Amino acid sequence: ILQLFTPLNFLGTVYNGLVMAFVDLGNLSELLAEDADITDSPHAVHIPSSETYLSTQPNKENAPVIEFKDVRFRYPTQPVTKGLKGFNLKMKRGTVTAIVGPTGAGKTTISRLLLRFYDTTSGSIFINGVDIKSSTQKSLRGLIGVVPQDTPMFNDTIKYNIAYGKRDATQSELETAARSAKILDFINSQDLGWETMVGERGLKLSGGEKQRVAIARCLLKDPDICVLDEATSALDTITEQSVQEALNGLSQNGKRTTLVIAHRLGTIKKADQICVVGDGVVQELGTHEELMKIEGGKYKELWNMQLKSTKGEDD
Ligand code: ATP
């Protein structure tokens, strides 16, 4: 019996540690399985805030706060022809970058590399001038907030679930975040309000509601960088609109640098730059208008496909 229980207890400890360390990094089972490989080097450095970093740069306007430089990466089980094969991308402060591409192109992998769930095989990712391989994980995670596709909920009150982004948040901070995330009216419409239990044993939240809880958490955390993994599942038009408004509140504060794994036409169209990933590299990069002008281009093709499938849902 002991042998059976010891590993489970151990997992419980790891789980709690990770919950604290990762503030809303989403898929905890994935972290449990894979985080153990990544450890701080003895000389690990603290990544400065974007503001501190940019204040030291002569060319502030154009210095990227995030840079993928010749990144190569392949999962050990992937065929050698697959994976990222020299991925380059720069993101400036206060901008939104949408990553698009066909299924399996590596969009989610790019966000996992940025969060350093894995180390690149070669090449580097710089955040505020520091190669994340040589940074402390604590500073990396402190700088990034994540809104995953499917947000895990704790079996606790809605207040606990939102305050998870900032444990010492005041009620007024919670309300401001919930209002911007378009979830405040929903909370107030419940008999028990903020004390409503959610999760397995409480109120079951819809995909759109969960994503708005994650957005509220992220607003409370107020990170320099935000990674959004937009839900692929169909949301009804009204829900989609309110999630979209909530996302806008999160990304368009002029200071936050946002990376979106984009599935929604609205987000893609409004992004400052759209990065089309395919065959392990950036195939096209530009604004919606720029990329739509490329005759026979990948983006144009993806856009038209997406448009068709959205029309199908509406019908
Ligand atoms: P989608 O749009 O379908 O979500 P994506 O562009 O986000 O796709 P990724 O999830 O990054 O694609 O996956 C890229 C490739 O890596 C796929 O071929 C996938 O099967 C493979 N892959 C993803 N995760 C792992 C893993 N943990 N181990 C091995 N291979 C993986």
Image: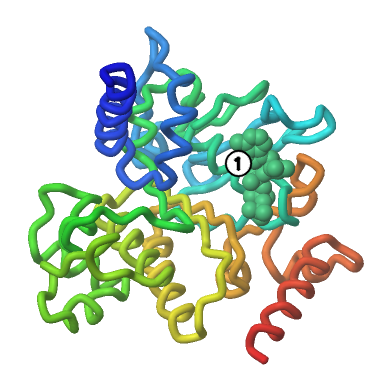
Q: Position of residue 199 (x, y in %)?
A: 28, 61
- Residue at point 39%, 40% (across, down): 50
Q: Position of residue 97 (x, y in %)?
A: 57, 55
Please identify the residue farthest to the top as the structure is shown. 42
Tag 1: amino acid: Ile
**Label 1, ligand 1: CB separation under 8 Å:** yes
Does residue 72 appear in this view? Answer: no
Horizontal placement of 90 versus 221: left or right?
Answer: right
Q: Position of residue 144 (x, y in %)?
A: 39, 43
**Dot 1, crowdedness within 10 Å: few (<14), some or many (≥20)?**
many
- Residue at point 25%, 70% (across, down): 203
Please identify the residue farthest to the right as the structure is shown. 296
Horizontal placement of 101 versus 207: left or right?
Answer: right
Q: Position of residue 201 (x, y in %)?
A: 24, 62
Does residue 124 appear in this view? Answer: yes
- Residue at point 72%, 77% (across, down): 309
Please identify the residue farthest to the front as the structure is shown. 1
Residue behind mark 1: 110
> Considering the image in quadrants, where does the N terminus appear?
top left
- Residue at point 67%, 92% (across, down): 315
Q: Which quadrant of the frame does ligand 1 lie within?
A: top right
> What sort of colour scheme is used for the picture?
rainbow
Please give the count of numbered marks on the rendered protein: 1
Horizontal placement of 153 versus 231: left or right?
Answer: left
Q: Up-down: is 270 above or below 49?
A: below
Foreground of the two, 170 or 89: 170
Horizontal placement of 236 versus 159: left or right?
Answer: right
Question: Could you say whether the residue bearing mark 1 is in a helix, strand or loop?
Answer: helix
Q: Up-down: is 99 above or below 209?
A: above
Question: In which image quadrant can residue 192 be found?
Answer: bottom left
